[in-house]
Image: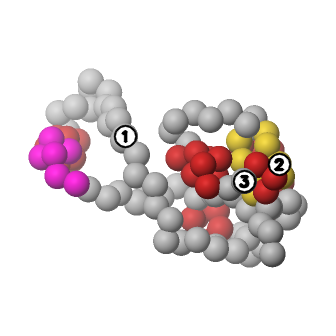
Amino acid sequence: MVHRFIAMKDRPPHLLWNEWIHNNVSEQNIVFLCSNSQVAFRSLESGCGISAVPRSVVKNDADLIKIAPHLHWNFPIWALVHRDMFNLAKIKAFIELLQQGKDKAFILKF
C-alpha cells in the first residue's frame, strides 16, 4: 500500500512536520502541495491523504484518525511578554523556569 501525503509547498523551517514529510516521503507520494494551511486542512478532511494537524483537531473531529502519535518535533520557542505584565508573579516564575536552561517539554493546548 502506498500512502499519499499532503504538504505545504513552501518549506519554512518552523514547520517541522512539513520538513519531515519532504525529507522522508518520496515526491511521488506527496499528492497535494499548497501554500495555505486552511486549504491543506480541507484536503485532509476530504480524504486526499495524510498530513499533520494538532492533536486537539483530531480529538474534536470524528472523521480524522491519529496514525503516528509517537512522532514528536522539538523546536525552539520565544516567550514574549508585554512590559506592563512583566512584574506579575506568574510571569516571573515562568521566566525563571525558562532561565534554568533545563530541557523541558511543553504541551500546547488551543
Q: Position of residue 77 (x, y in %)?
A: 37, 40
Query: Height in image: 62 above or below 107?
Result: below
Q: Which numbered disc, 2 or 1, marks the residue that appears first in the sequence?
A: 2
What SS does tag 3 mark? loop
**Quarter of the image where one finds residue 10:** top right
Drawn side of residue 81 relative to residue 20, left or right: left
Q: Which amino acid does label 2 sit on?
A: Phe
Front position among marks 3 and 1: 3
The residue that label 3 is drawn on is 26
Q: What residue type is labelled 1?
A: Ile
Q: What residue type is labelled 3?
A: Ser
Q: Position of residue 51 (x, y in %)?
A: 69, 58
The residue that label 1 is drawn on is 77
Q: Which numbered disc, 2 or 3, marks the residue that appears first in the sequence?
A: 3
Query: Height in image: 25 above or below 99?
Result: below
Whether residue 44 appears in this view of the structure is no
Dot 1 alpha-carbon crowd within 10 angstroms: few under 14, some 14 to 19, many 20 or more: few
